[in-house]
Amino acid sequence: MTASPSTLTKATASQAVEAAIERFHETEAQIQAFQWLDEKRVREEARSQDERSDAAPLTGMVVGIKDLIDTVDAPATYGSPIYSDNRPHKDALIVTRLRQAGAVPFGKTVTTEFALFNPPKTRNPWNLERTPGGSSSGSAAAVAAGVVPVALGTQTAGSIIRPAAFCGIFGFKPSFNLLPSAGLKHISPSLDTVGLLARQISDIRRVFDAVRSGHTALPPSPSRLRIAIIRTPWWQDIATEIRARIDWVASQLADCGDGFDIVESPNSMLFGDVTEAQQAIMAAEVLANLAYERRDHVSQLSPLLRRYLDQAAQAEPSLETAARMTVNRLKIEPDLIFGDANLLLSAGTLTEAPTRDSTGDPLLCRAWTILGAPSINLPIGFSTSGLPIGLQLAARPGYDDLLLDAASHIAQSLDISTAPMARLNA
């Protein structure tokens, strides 16, 4: 076996692609992470990147592309048979930026149906009977299994953080629109956010800096970071092992002398209010943005999606209006939920990865998505059943650099800067 593409250093694009193709053949029959892969095409692109004369920042980087994002050289099915023959005429802007930066887009990774809740074919590399999460299912599985070092995901509720937690990798949802979403199949335009999944936190930073939409001028990061644990209204519903692991991490950070002050957040109930607001806004926007599919192709929608859309259609418009008022107030005054903390620390999932008849619950991720706030999953260990456990860290909107710097610092303190490659266990 050749070196994993995530372990190659100073690799040419062609070397990285060959390693990815070999690992794809070793794992794909088991994890089913890809919707499409044209090996000839990715080899041609790798050769083209290797022939460049400029010093591109992502030279030698292979990136999986979620099948909710258009590429000119592959179908874009959006996880639905309605679009089985859809061939985009151009790349999504994020894919264009990746190519310009020297990266090689590597196939299309499986998404759930329209990035919603219907479980896909993809399996969790840590346990093939468990879900990798959704909706960025294939991206998370491909990264965790070492096929690609980085993959694109999208998040409308919890579709980056949750799969990253279930698959034991880093998952970064930037501030809203900091990575471009043009060329994405939108289902909820005020929520849909492009992000990154990787086994190495340094790869998250490398790709993000190469393709982001500018830098926000912010004050310098403080010498000590105040991190508040927000336990949310659902703390007692979170699996005991996850709660214990989060408390252990908090105690480690408090005791390590590395510049962290750990406190308790008093704003759990407000977190609950924002979470409920996200659900109302998302339902209304999904109903509007899938109106064509519901009207003209309802028989090709899954029963789960049909029920979701039917319920959304029955909702009182006043619920969405009230929800937007709640969200707008917090967007104007983020201190209402952050208080005097620089970062908020919480669980990202209620449980470890469930069985494959579900993609898990995005409940604990919804608030940061609707607020447009950056969040990241850190892989912090494993349960007694051998499944990954994650920790979610969030910052105020626009404070992505502070979040990534802090996450890197925490990862170094906990010795988790590189997540382990998944063993393929049944």
Image (cartoon, rainbow, N blue to C red):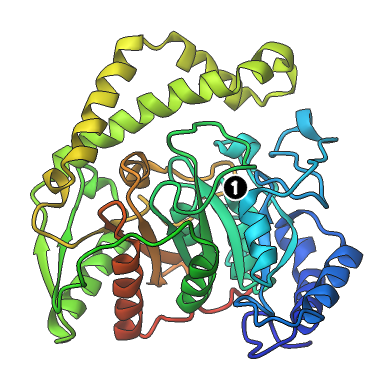
The C terminus - image quarter: bottom right
Percent x, y for residue 237? 27, 46
Q: Residue at x 37, y 85 (%)?
A: 415
Whether residue 216 is visible, yes or no, is yes
Q: Nearer the viewer, residue 414 or 11?
A: 11
Q: Secondary structure at mark 1?
A: loop
Q: Nearer the viewer, residue 262 or 373?
A: 373
Q: Horizontal placement of 391 versus 268: left or right? A: right
Say which quarter of the image contains residue 181.
top right
Q: Which residue is mark 1?
A: 356
The N terminus - image quarter: bottom right
Q: Residue at x 68, y 70 (%)?
A: 103
Say which quarter of the image contains residue 424.
bottom right
For disc 1, the neighbor class at 10 Å (few under 14, some 14 to 19, many from 20) is some
Q: Residue at x 62, y 62 (%)?
A: 141
User: With respect to residue 426, does 364 lie above or below?
Assistant: above
Whether residue 123 is visible, yes or no, is no
Residue, far bottom: 10
Percent x, y for residue 172? 44, 60
Q: Nearer the viewer, residue 135 or 72?
A: 72
Q: How many marks?
A: 1
User: With respect to residue 107, does 19 lie above or below?
Assistant: below
Percent x, y for residue 125? 62, 65
Q: Residue at x 55, y 31 (%)?
A: 187
Percent x, y for residue 8? 66, 87
Residue, far right: 40
Q: Horizontal placement of 275 versus 121: left or right? A: left
Q: Amino acid at mark 1?
A: Arg
